[in-house]
Every structure is written in structure tokens, then in C-alpha cells.
Amino acid sequence: MTTSVLDDQSPVNLSDSPWAVETHGLTKRFGDNVAVDDVELLVPRGCAFGYLGPNGAGKTTLIRVLLGLTHADAGTMSLLGYPVPRHRDVALARVGAIVDEPRFHGHLTGRQNLEILAAARERAARGRIDGSLERVGMTHRADDRVSKYSMGMRQRLGVAACLLGDPQLLILDEPMNGLDPAGMHEMRDMILSLVSEGRTVMLSSHLLDEVERTCDAVAIVDNGKVIRQGPISELLAGASVEVNVECSSPERARTILSATALGAQIDVETSGLSIHLAAGTGRDAIAEINRLLVEDGIAVYRLQEVQVSLESWFLQVTSRLGESE
Amino acid sequence: MTSDSGSALTATQAATPTSGAARDRRGSWIPTSTMITTRIMELRKRRGLMAALIVVNIGIPAIFLLVRLIAHAVAPKSYGPAGGYDIFTSLVAGVMYVFGFIVAATLGCTAGSVDLTDGMFRHLVITGRSRLALYFARIPAGLAIIVPMVAVGFTIVCAVCVFAAPTKLDYQGVPVPSGLSLTGFESWAAQHPKEAICGLPYRGGKNGPQVGVPCFIKQNGTVVILPGSSGFKHISPATEKADAVAIAKQNYLEYSRTFLYPSNSLMVKAGLWIELEAAIGFIVGLGLASLMGQRTVAVVLMIVLEIVLTPIFSRTAIPHLINVQRGLVGLATAHLEPGGLPRGIGGGGGGGPPLIPESTTVAVCVIVGWLVVWTALGAWRMSKRDA
């Protein structure tokens, strides 16, 4: 890893950093495959941050590098303002994380597993075991062996393990995996409650709908690179505007609209048109479409602006869209 | 999952990261006592492994001695006493030494690999605790299990061998009082000349016994003169006594090494010796398994080392590989075997010269080298491994 400017500063002075996670030029290679490619990531403190990307995009690898589970090949990074790996012990003292599927000693109970993990943390961590179990709703099964737990219960135990350190930053890799709908709802509520306490939650997930409902900001990673990041509202505002039109003569309507200066991409569908206007196009453009069609004698039955979802925007900006076409 | 944080954790409980981490010295390579105790718990709760270790280390010698106790109680004339010096030396050098090593190596290999195979290593690394501390916590934890376990098995052997020892010494088939000095042994021979002449071996010689009576001692201790012989009729009592004393003198060295039960000194030395062997097995197994990242192959390699490679290299001196042979930890440990125990695999015990010449200093250096190198390799791999 290259020498960081941050490395020269003391951890005490850096703890006031506005970023919970900060990476610059972070790179991780596996042979010829670049899993994390020059990643510049800024995760603000006190928010829920989604880290999204297609399978194999390098989400888990980035998390593993951040947590010191594997080394980076280049770049700098810091957690809660502490440069890692130099101040890894100080930084991770207030970080909780689940990476991949949470696994524990199957022959021990959930509580005993947490005792082992608490022993590796500060003394106060042992006193947080009951509170953590209660918070994830595992108190009644805490004294059962983990080998008897379902996937969802292990996921909850993993979150309880994260809470042992009373973390300022939680990094959750696919936290909804294995949870039933009620469990996902509870997990979402818990993440929101953690954020409301001033903690930062960074989560990676394939469930874009869940992320949209949970997170304030996201970063999109594709082929190891962060291609977009920022607050969800701002990112979606930059997406193209889609307008669906049901009309009497779709082919003629397309010809009319194509001749205008709207600069739209127009697809003909069975009952009408699907029009993609450039990002930032005002609502006046929709009225203009209606006016042009009506003036040329085309009957407009329905004209609807489609609300851009995180999922559709995600597909627009990632290479996955190209693959599906 | 409850979102109510009333009784659970809240951010306001959080200490500053700097103060918390500084207090628990998380970056230090020295493990905390809590880390060690929880590691002991993790190993101790492996019921199958613990049961197997107890059966091998305690059960086998205990059952062997129990069967002997019962057999002797039921038919004392057919079956000798359960304990005694010979049983002790055989069990310690032949069974507990080898099995203690294998048991300890199995525990070491388990301790060195389970965090990886169970997926806990990742959780532990994320705590920010030094990986070296995570590794070093396993050493006292494993020893805290294996040392008492070996001690219990050894204590049972010692207790039975002392308290169920024969009441009379059976030296060369002749019932003789035990623990006699040379003078006392000669005095006993003078008082029992026929037993000494007929029962004890003698080599003749210029000042040796002159009598040539064809006789032997029966199992019940009575002297039997072979038919056709005139026996002791034409031998004067003074000659008989003189010859018996001469024979006793010839036999004293061997007699002095024959005991009813092991001495306290021997038991302490033997106990420390098998504990050393067990500790070596555990620490080397821990390092090997940590290096390999898995248990099964590591256990197999440790067993091969102990019961295949070490005996082979101890019995065959290969000139070009003599230093390699000296570098085997099994041979080095055997060189430290207490005198009075039969040689197990070619070490220096049992009164005979070692098969592969090696000084005690070199043997100690080899043992220390194995412990340091395997610990360093295991710790290095753990600190560099992707979690």
C-alpha cells in the first residue's frame, strides 16, 4: 500500500473526521483480476449507506479490505477517521461487521460465542452481551447451540456480535440474507434505529428495494470501480425521465416526436410509446409532448411520468443493463 | 429484533474509540486472561474430542490397571499384583509417552484450525485484537487442558503401581527383600545360601563360587535338586555361605535396579518427562495446524512423526543424515528420558547408551528449537492469512 498522508497524523486528531469510511485509490488484485479498482469512497457519519453492485462487482472484497481481513495492494483508507491498517486496533474497537454468511462455533451456544468475541474486545463488551441479544431478539435462544440455529438466527447473532463493541460504524454484508419478510422488516427497523442513535451503518445488498427504503446514500460499484455515489435523492434526480404514453397511433406519434428538439429516446410499444427524456428535463417537456400529439390529431388516452426507482436507475448505470439487452 | 433500545445498547454508552482501545491494549500480542479462559471453554466444550482424549489418556491405562487389579483379586496365584515397578515403567515409557503426545497433538491441531474452519476467525479479526494475541491465547488454554489430563492419567498409574505393588521382590524368580544394600544383600545370601546358589545366575571366575549343584527354584520359592545329584551333602556350610555371598555380589548391580514400586524421584521425573512430551505435541500440533489451516492432515502428520518416523530414525543410524536424525524432536525428548525407565524409542534412558549419540544440551536445544520454530510459523501464518 502506498504511504498515506493520514498515516502521519495521530489517531486522536483524526477521530473528528466527517467520514465514517474514506478510501482513496484503494486497489485489490487477485492475480490478473482487479476486484477493487482505484476506489474512491466517502461514507458520511451518522447515516445508512448502501453499497450496491452486481454479483462479482467487488463489494465483499472492499469490505474485507476495509476490515483488515485481507490486505490492499494500493491506496489508502480510514475508518472513523483512523487510518488503517496503521491504527487498525483503534479503528476496529468501534466497528462491528458481518462479512459473508455469519458462522460461529456450532458446538457452543449463541451466548458462549459472544463471550469469546467479547473477550477479544474491551472489558465492557462482556456486559453488553445480554443487551445485544435482546436487541436482535435472540434472548430466548441464546443458550441453544448455534448448530441448531437457522440461517436467519445466525444472521441475528452476527448483528449481536457487531453490537458488542458498541460500534460507531456497522458494516453489514448482505444483512437481509436468510431473513423472512418479518425478519427483514425488523432488520430494517433496527438499522434505522441504529442510525437514529448517531451510528453509521454501511450495508451491501442485492435487495435494492430494501436499500432504497433503508439508506440515505448509496455508492454503486461495478467491475471493482465506484461509478456513482451520493444521497439517493440526488442520484435519482440525475436519472433520465421516463414517460409512458397511450395513444391511437404509436408509430406516427414516434415520427412526430422524433422530429422535435426534445432529444428523447422513443420506444414503440403495443399500446403506445415509452419516452426517455434526458436527465434534468422539466415537466414542461411532458406538456409539450401532449401538445404536439394532440395538434397532429393523435388521441392521447394516458400520459404518465414513471417514478424512477433505485432499481431502474441501478440498471441504467451498471453494466448489468448492457448484459440484459 | 426489537427496535426499542431502552434496555439495550445506545450510542450514548459508547466510550471514545481511543480510550477504549488504549485501555485494553488491543494491538498488543499478549493475550488477556479472559481470552485464555474463553478459549479453554471453547476447547473444553468439544465433547467428542474431550471424550476421546480422556479415553486415550486416562481410560486406557486405568482400564488396564483395573483388569489387573480384578484378576489379581480373583486369582492371586495366577495373576501377579496389578502395580509395581515393572508395570509403572512399561506403562509410562510404552503407553503414556506415545499416547500423551498423540492426544496433545490432536488437541493442538484442533486449537490451531477450528477458528478458521468454524468461521470464527473472521469475527475475531474484526474485533481489532492483534492476531498474534489470538494465536498466543491458544497456548496456555490448550496446556491448561492437556497438562492436567496427562497428570490425572499419570497419577492413576502412580497410585496403582505404588499401592498395588508386590509385597516381596521377585528377583530372577527368587523371593528377596527389596531395597537392600550390598552388605544387606550379601547377608541375606549368607542366610539363604541354597536359594542364592540355585536361583541367582552366576558367571564363575577366579574368586567366584565353586559349587556346581544342579538345582533350581520352584515358583513357590522352594529349592529343587535335580535327581541323581548328591546336592549340598558334600559341601560344607561355610563354603555354601561363601559361594552364596560371592553370587550375591555378582548380582547386586542388577538387583539394585529392581524395585517393588517406583521411587518418588522416578515418579516425579517420569511425570515431568511425559508432560514435556505432551506440551511439545500440543505446541507443534498447534503451529502445524495453524500453518496448514486444517486439522485432519496435521493430526495424521503428527501421528506419522511420532509412531513411524521417530522409531525408524531411532533404530537406524544413517551417516549422511545423522544430524537430521538428531534434529527429530522425538529423539531429543527420548534423550531426556529419566534413568530407570525402559528405552521407549531409542533414547538415553534404561541404562543403555543412546542409539544416536546426542548430548543433553543438544537435545534441549532441539526441543526448544522445535517449539520456537513451530510457534513462529503458526503465528506468522495466522497474522498473514486472509480471514
Image (spheres, coloured by chain):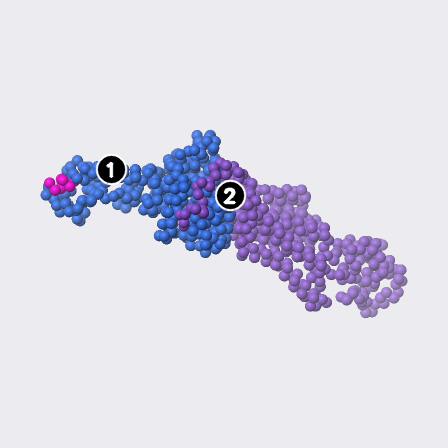
- The image position of residue A212, as x and y in percent, is 32, 44
Q: Which residue is mark 2?
A: A124
**Amino acid bearing label 1:** Ala
Q: Quadrant of the C terminus of chain A?
A: top left
Write the residue at 88% across / 63% down. Answer: B235
Write the residue at 65% across / 43% down. Answer: B364
A135 vs A162, nearest the viewer: A135
Write the residue at 13% across / 42% down. Answer: A293
**Amino acid bearing label 2:** Ala
Q: Which residues are magenta?
A: A289-295
Q: Is residue B116 visible?
A: no
Q: Which residue is mark 1?
A: A279
Q: Quadrant of the N terminus of chain A?
A: top left
Q: Is residue A276 visible?
A: yes
Q: Which chain is purple?
A: B
Disc nearest the viewer among 2 and 1: 2
Instruction: Please check the rendered image and state whether residue A292 is part of the magenta-colored stretch, yes or no.
Output: yes
Q: Colour of chain A?
A: blue
B206 vs B138, nearest the viewer: B138
- The image position of residue A194, as x and y in percent, is 40, 43
Tell whether A206 sits left or right of B352.
left
